[in-house]
Each structure stands twice: as C-alpha cells, then as structure tokens.
Amino acid sequence: MNKNIDPKQQAVRDEVKAFAEKEIYPRSKELDQMPEPRKFPVDLYRKIGEAGFIGYAMPPEFGGKGKSHLEYITLVEELCYHDAAVGLLCAVGELATYPIIHFASDEQKKKFVPDCAAGKRIPAFVLTEPNAGSDAANQSTEAVETGNEYVINGEKIFIMHGDAADLGVLFCKIKDQPKLSAIIVEDTKQAGWQARTLKNKMGMRAATTGGIILKDVRAPKANLMGEIGKGFRYAMMTLDSARIGVAAQGVGIAQRALDESVAYAKKRIAFGAPIAKLQAIQWMIADMATRLEAARGLCYKAVLKQDKGEPFSLDAAMAKLYCSETANFCVDRAMQIHAGYGYIGEFSIIEKLYRDQRVLEIYEGTSEVQRLVIAGNVIGR
Ligand SMILES: Cc1cc2nc3c(=O)[nH]c(=O)nc-3n(C[C@H](O)[C@H](O)[C@H](O)COP(=O)(O)OP(=O)(O)OC[C@H]3O[C@@H](n4cnc5c(N)ncnc54)[C@H](O)[C@@H]3O)c2cc1C
C-alpha cells in the first residue's frame, strides 16, 4: 500500500531509513536496556540535530531546513517506525523550540533557535507540575521580578529531557498576575535548577524524563517570551501542533506492529501451515491495516491544514486520540499474533513496542483531554 500523499514523503522515508541503519539499529537495544540511573544520550541527540531532523520544518533563517509540516510529520513517523524512543528525542527538540519560533521576539529567536535546531542545545518544554497535569493552568510555580531578573520558585515534573536540558521554556505565574506567562531559562547549570532523571520509566527509555525543583532560579527579564499573561495560550497552541507529532508517533509504531505481524504470520508454522493461513490471524491483520489507514488519514489531514495555515486544533486532537489508540490496538494484536515470541523481548520487538506506545495516550494531553477538546468543538461549550 502506498503510504504517501505527496511524492516528497518518500525522500523523507529513505533519508530516515539510511540514518536508522547507521545510527539507530546498532544502539537500539542498548538504549532501551540501559541500567538505572539512565543517561540522556547526548551524542545521539547531537547526531539527530546534525542530520537536520530537529529543525526539519523550522525556517532556514534560524537554522532550520524549511520543510513542510507534512515532511516533518513523515520524519517523526519513520523515526518511530525504526525506534519510537529515538523519534521522541527528535519530536521533543521540535516541541520545545516551537514556542520560541512562534511567540518569541526576533532577537530571542536569533539567540536560541539555531542551536536548538542543530541539536547543540537541548531544550525542554516545562509546563507540568505535580498538581497541574491535565489542569495545566493551575500552576504554583511563581516568578518574582527583582531588578532586571525573574527569580523563580516551584516544581515541575514529567519533563521530557528535563534532566539533560540546557534551556527551558518555562511556564509559570508572574507575581500578582493571574494568568500564566512563559520565560526562557537559558542557564540550567545554576544551583537553583535541580533536575533529576525519573526512574523506572515503562517505555521510550532512550528519551529520558526529568523532574525539576526550582529554587530561586534566575532568568533575565529580557527572556520573557511574548506577552505577560499569554503563556497558557502559547502552551496550548504549541500542544496543538505537537499533538500531530504524537499522532505520527502512533502511525509509525502501528505500521511497525503490522509489518512485524505480517512477516511473522507468514513464517510461523502451526498445525502444518503458516498461521497467516488462519482466518483468525487474517482478521486481526485486516483490522490492524484498516485502523492504521484511517489513523494515517487523520494525521495527514491535520498536518495538511497546518501547512495551509488553516485552524487545525480539532483535527490535531482527533488525530492524536485516534492514532494513539490505534497504536495501542495494533501493538496488542501484534502481541497476540506473536504470542510467546511477542511477550518475551529477546525474540522480537513487540514487547518494546508495547511499552513504548502506551505513553501516547498520556502525554501532550490524555485521551480524555482530547475527547474534551473534540466534544467542545462538536457540541459547543
Ligand atoms: C513520559 C512523559 C513525558 C512527558 N513530557 C512532558 C513534557 O515534556 N513537558 C510537560 O510539561 N509535561 C510532560 N508530560 C506531562 C503530561 O502532559 C501529563 O502527564 C498529562 O498531561 C496528564 O497529567 P497527569 O499525569 O498529572 O494526570 P492527571 O491530570 O492527574 O489525570 C489523571 C486522570 O484523570 C483524567 N482527567 C483529568 N482531568 C480530566 C477531565 N477534566 N475530564 C476527564 N478526565 C480527566 C486524566 O485523563 C487521567 O486519566 C509528560 C508525561 C509523561 C508521562
């Protein structure tokens, strides 16, 4: 089946395949099985940056490759096909740089984006707090203006690359302001930025996740991003875009589950014939292929709207919801088809896919939150 709706997508798939053979497959297992405490793979992240993948859809004047969002989404899909955690490394670099590109001043863009796009600087999107997950506006972290600086106190959790980041796009309240603002923290080596790697993460292990305690963290007032009080809006607009990225992660994982299942079903013999001859197996494969086709369609529809400059918030929520649930469905069916050889990780990739896909229904807005967004659009608020 032809996956492409645009001929340019094939070049992306080929580019990622060549990268994966050289840089991903030789290390995939080692990155997944890394003992605790896990270390963020800085060298691989730099290679992803050098390949131009983080800045794929970013403007060339800020060091990006200037590709379309469709091409970027295809890139994430393909990286996740080969190794979802490596796809996530790339997607998080893009997610955390996105608000700077879209809401920061030209001066800030010139200062921060080129290094982020090149993978030389590791940015993090620092929104979630222990008591503010889905209810993201309910933040406790506070910045106080002192001279030319903000002094920030609070706590953040579940921050992708938060343990390794050397730049944080941080969302918090500024004292006496009721609404969230966004501040770029460029010095994460200061004593008050206390980051740690969260332990025992189920999947996506190569892309580590951090918790950060902020104790009198200082950032110049010049690093206020955009306008005071607009931080929540910037965060939600960033997540709208990133949700299409999560949808693409789901498409890549689901495609891998399907391809592995077809290949396995053709070679596994039971009762004297390949299990692919059994209707029970064929139906599972038919269901996987059909859902995957629908998922890819929703994902590409959302990103085409983004490329055309049309509103895409509803499409992104639908794509994220459906593609993540499709990844879950397809990997679960793949596990059933592989049976014992799926459940035990030494025999196939299915056990890793099972762990990697599960977070897609949680981060960047849970499935319940996507349903809220969709219902709000369909029914009206
Ligand atoms: C691996 C990982 C990486 C992450 N990366 C980042 C990152 O880089 N930056 C960042 O800022 N955050 C990040 N997050 C945080 C992520 O976005 C939150 O975990 C997510 O938004 C859910 O918040 P929560 O975990 O606090 O769950 P809660 O908000 O406490 O939700 C608990 C349950 O209640 C449900 N629920 C909550 N409110 C409603 C409602 N109104 N209606 C219906 N159901 C509801 C939820 O769907 C869920 O089932 C990451 C999380 C993980 C696990």
Image (cartoon, rainbow, N blue to C red):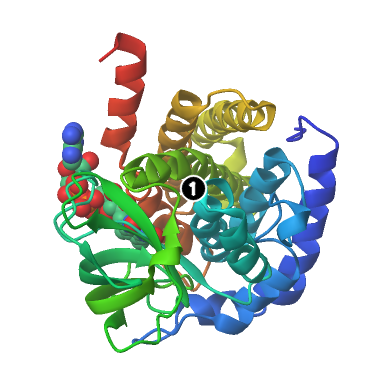
Q: Quadrant of residue 141?
A: bottom left
**Residue 233: % across, % down:** 37, 39
**Residue 227: % across, % down:** 40, 47
- Report which residue position mark 1 lands on: 334
Q: Residue furthest front?
A: 147
Horizontal side of 144 relative to 21 (left or right) equals left
If the image is split into quadrants, where does the C terminus sit?
Answer: top left
If the image is split into quadrants, where does the N terminus sit?
Answer: top right
**Residue 348: % across, % down:** 53, 65
Q: At 46% from the left edge and 74% from the top edge, which residue is drawn? A: 186
Give 68 or 23, whichever is nearer the viewer.
68
Q: Examine the rendered structure and indicate whether residue 36 appears above or below residue 335.
A: below
**Residue 101: % across, % down:** 58, 52
Q: Secondary structure at mark 1?
A: helix
Residue 262, visible in the rendered structure? yes
Q: At 75% from the left edge and 68% from the top edge, which residue is drawn? A: 51
Horizontal side of 15 relative to 279 (left or right) equals right
Q: At 33% from the left edge and 72% from the top edge, which residue is drawn? A: 149
Q: At 57% from the left edge and 66% from the top edge, which residue is drawn? A: 86
Q: Examine the rendered structure and indicate whether residue 330 appears above or below residue 220.
A: above
Give 61 or 137, whichever is nearer the viewer.
61
Residue 341, visible in the rendered structure? no
Bin the neighbour count of mark 1 within 10 Å (Cα to Cα): few under 14, some 14-19, many 20 and up.
many
Give 111 or 292, whichever is nearer the viewer.
111
Identity, as a three-letter code, of the amino acid under mark 1: Ala
Horizontal side of 96 relative to 160 (left or right) equals right
Give 103 or 310, whichever is nearer the viewer.
103
